[in-house]
Amino acid sequence: MSDVVAVERVTIPPTGACQGCAMVLISRHALDTLGRNSAVIIPASCGAWSGAMLIDRGPTQFPSAAAAASGVARGLKAAGHKNTNVVVIAGDGGTYDIGLQALSGAAERGERIIYICQNNQAYMNTGIQRSGATPRWAWTTTTPIGSVIQGKTVWPKSMPEIMEAHHIPLVATASIHNIPDYKRKIKLAQRLTTEEGKGLSYIEVLNTCPTGWRYSPEKMVAMARLAVETGFWPVYEVVEGKFKLNIKPKTLKPLKEFLQMQGRFRHLTDEQIAEMERWVHERWQRLLERDERGY
Amino acid sequence: MVKEKIDFLTGNDAIAYAVKLARVKVIAAYPITPQSPVTEKISEYIANGEMDAEFIEIEGEHSCLAAMRGAGACGVRIFTATCGPGLMYAHENLEMVHRDRIPLVIAVPNRSYSSLFADYTDSMCEATTGFIQLFVESPQEALDTTLQAFRIAEDHRVLMPLMVLYDGYVTSHTGATVRLPSQEDVDRFLPPFKPYAVRIDPSRSEFIQWDTPGVPLQEMEHEQAMTNAKEVIKEANEEYAEIFGRRYGNGLIETYRVEDAEAALVTMASMTGTARHVVDILRDKGERVGLIKLRSFRPFPAEDFIELQEKYGFKALGVCERDVTHGCNYGEVYGDLKASLYDLADRPKMINFILGLGGSDIRVQDLQFAYQKVLEAARTGKVEKQTWFGHEIGAVEIRLAGF
């Protein structure tokens, strides 16, 4: 059940995004849910060119999103503005890699920032180069399919777990095939971070990317759903230390169904698919155990 | 009559005190030697309730300048301090602060990259970033200039960020007698910040589209702002003198015994005190020497130097500086000054003295030697190549062979 009621649109279509880009939904629903009393900070990313909005956009360089947001949050406080949402919408490169230091610092300081990472698993804005969020064996322009090395050789890091280690009020993942769940998490972040001042909230959404993943745009929502149903993208939340798996399929669909729809995984051998599935299932098992424990 | 009390303060403490008097609203800082005491002192003021400000204990200088940019966009008075590698690390966001016309005041106790001690390796790297750069000589001038700095940077004709530069350890950590103005008098000189435009303001009801002018137009606007800054620096210096009775030349440069001088040295920051002493010694011996202290390095006061040259007709000028542009074998100030005077028919012979690098001492005998060289140039019309202090060229070869 969703507790989100009708909202005023503060984002203005159209956008400069590619066809079938999940970022459009991620930004729009976040900002429309938070409303006009917000300032949004967007570092270098696909989002930097994503269109107009009826709220203030703050300044930042690629590594500095969370730092600039810290300054905006404190500056607004010093200027006497109460309960303004300070929102960052960054990509995975600006979060996992070059922006990690600033994000970690802001989380540790307990800054009032709602940080949304729209994770499309590579540097899509600069031309599909690998990032710390790129899955193992995926093709990108810097992990090409060569005669000696094929795709990325290492596993991606787990950013939500890194953020959990900062003891912040909210760490959550979300998927664009379940907008009510995503909006509920945005509302939760607004309460915990902006209203109650309990510190930084981190929400990471899988940004299914037809351009970088090499699939046709109309399959955007189906792709997001399949990512969750195969266990590739678990949707969960950690609210003030309490863990909950939000979407719990009884059995996971074969990972192959998700992988074979995308050009970036076309070269995978059956052994690689099996190993990736094992990796996904082990993580899923750990999350089920956490869900049972509740922390 | 102004109310002032007298205390014994280091340059760092004097700046922290000025920041408190300026009623700064948001401060972000990351510790680095020899800057740290500035932010430690400000932290104490805030912890003791003597100062009402947001303090962001940031995790690095790159982030620090980003946070200052964010806070500055909300239209409040802001301050930070860093130096050396920290300043260089912040470079990307220094550039952005100036592009956004954020009137940030930043204190920089100059520090070499390769050592903890004073030279201008750090701030000279940022000479092109659009920051106003004022070099100060003493803790007193550091305090006075920091108060003037907010006036200058926040002036609507300027809206440029500003660095207050002082020699690491030599000025940052050395105590001196400082006259501390009262809050009441400072409030008269420095009223609350009235932003030209607030970039982030959730209380306004309509969408404000920020124009991004093309690059050439934007660069020309910035150059215009820097030109305006020359007048504004002079005004701030004069108005400060009217209230507090302390004046630093015309704000851009300060002269000492230049009347009838045939040769003069140009100095910056703390070495100026030593140079004044040397001028007195030489004047007692009948030598016609003078001194020009460069206070505003950016904007560069070319017109003021031209005016001095036209008025006094120096035969030779020496530029003493704690920096070098590798590949040119001269310092930044020498290059700028020589360019400024080039079109004059009666231009002086010029020598560059590179000294005090890595915090090495600048002694009375060093500056006596420099004066001797410029006097020789004034009399013979012949100029030796640039002069380095502290090392023989042969010593460099021996050191490199040791690798």
Image (cartoon, coloured by chain):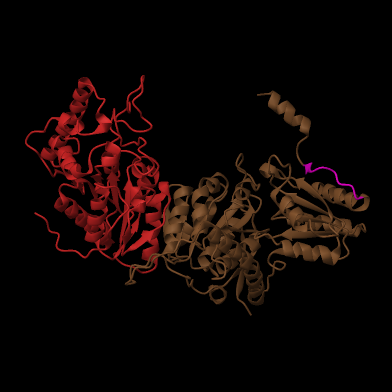
Residue B245 location (% of width, % of height): 68, 74
Q: In the shown orientation, is residue A186 left or right of residue A145?
A: left
Q: Position of residue B62 (x, y in %)?
A: 47, 48
Taking the image as shown, residue B382 lies to the left or right of residue A103, namely right
Relative to residue B402, is residue A227 depicted above or below?
Answer: below
What colour denotes chain B?
brown
Q: Residue at x 73, y 64 (%)?
A: B303
Question: Which of these two is toward me, A30 or B84?
Answer: A30
Q: Name the residue at 41% across, 53% down.
A: A60
Predominant secondary structure, magenta span: loop
Classify A154 as above or below B359: above
Q: Which quarter of the rendered picture does the C terminus of chain B lie within? A: top right
Report whether residue A295 is seen.
no
Task: For the N terminus of chain B, give its image quadrant.
Answer: bottom right
**Residue name at image x 33 percent, y 51 percent:** A47
Residue B383 is one of the magenta-drawn residues: yes
Q: Quadrant of residue A245?
A: top left
- Quadrant of residue A194 in the image? bottom left
The x and y percentages for residue B73 are 43, 63
Q: Residue furthest left?
A: A250
- For the record, the magenta segment spans B381-388
**Is residue A163 shown above or below B164?**
above
**Camera-side residue: A153 or B15?**
A153
Q: Inspect the magenta stretch and tell me whether residue B186 lies in it.
A: no
Numbered circles on residues, count: 0
Tell which chain the image draws in red.
A
From the viewer's perspective, is residue B70 above or below residue A251?
below
Q: Position of residue B244 (x, y in %)?
A: 64, 74
Foreground residue, B182 or B353?
B353
Residue A13 relative to residue A221: left or right: right
Q: Residue at x 20, y 25 (%)?
A: A273
Q: Is residue A9 visible?
A: yes
